[in-house]
Image: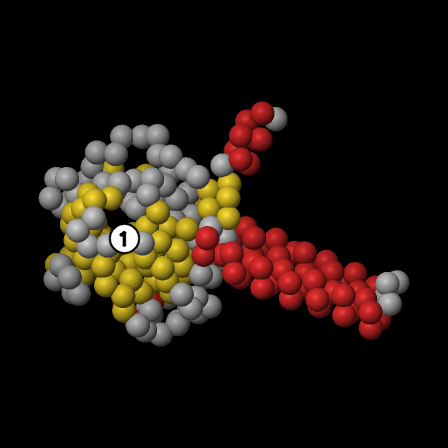
Amino acid sequence: MGKKLRKLKKIRIHREGTSTLIISGVSLVLLNLLTFYAFGPWKVFCYVVLGVSIVFYAVVLNFFQCPVRRFEGDNERTVVASADGKVVVVEEVMEDEFFHEPRIMVSIFMSLFNVHNNWVPCDGRVKTVIHHNGRYKAAWLPKASTENERSSIIITTPEGQDILIRQVAGALARRIVTYLKPGEDCVVDEHLGFIKFGSRVDVYLPLDAKILVGVGQKTTGNETVIATL
């Protein structure tokens, strides 16, 4: 019981969700008040609307959670998952935008039921941060990585290896937030950014990286080790 309470204390709401939670909460309260006023307190329909409202708000509340996590392993040459979700791609691809060479891409898809906070995957210095406007295809489609709205971040590790991270918008996502700035030092445990609603995070690793996850595996941001360099 004590362990559960300590875990609950480490969960907070992300600042990116404050306005959304307030607006949606007020809207749902007004909707239910109007429903009860129009149909009366004993109509089954009113309780159906109330139940749906509670479930909807619970999903949105879970979406904007901001868990406080600390990576307990060895940071050296380690790449951790940037997001909660499921691995949908592990394959060798040609990265033509920055590296112009083959890389291993590991993609993590975040559903509406996942926390959408993003974490820094490795220690290093931020080399590049670029935002690209684009389309809003379903995030799990292969072309989403290059055609959807996205932010590309390159981190140079202490050993001199460049790691590319892409925050990719999905069919519902309309806002990608990236906190890192070029020239800044960054470490595992720091927040990389936030993506509102369904989306994915792609990590492009050197071909000699040892991949430790597989397609279909669930990941926990800032906890699951996806590769070692």
Q: Position of residue 147 (x, y in %)?
A: 30, 71
The image position of residue 224, as x and y in percent, is: 36, 39
Give the x, y percent position of residue 72.
35, 30
User: What residue is shown at x 44% (from left), y 39% (from top)?
Assistant: 68
Residue 228: image quadrant is top left
Camera-side residue: 209 or 4?
4
Q: Is residue 89 left or right of residue 97?
A: right
For image coordinates 19% across by 54% down, the residue present is 182
Depicted 181 relative to depicted 28: above or below: above
The scheme the figure's colours follow is: secondary structure
Could you tell me which secondary element the residue under label 1 belongs to? loop
Residue 139 sits in quarter: bottom left
Q: Is residue 86 visible?
A: no
Q: Position of residue 198 (x, y in %)?
A: 45, 61
Quadrant including the N terminus = top right
Crowd rating for badge 1 (residues with CA inside 10 Å; few <14, some 14–19, many 20+): many
Q: Residue at position x 29%, y 45% from top?
A: 121
Residue 116 appears in the picture as rendered: yes
Q: Residue furthest top?
A: 2
Describe residue 34's horizontal placement relative to residue 184 as left or right: right
Instruction: State which quarter of the image contains the C terminus.
Output: top left
Total numbered labels placed on residues in the image: 1
**Pick the front one: 153 or 148:** 153
In percent of the image, x 60 and y 63: which residue is there?
24
Residue nearest the viewer, comparing 11 with 51? 11
Badge 1 amino acid: Leu
Q: Is residue 19 left or right of residue 99?
A: right
Q: Quadrant of residue 99?
A: bottom left
Residue at numbered disc 1: 180
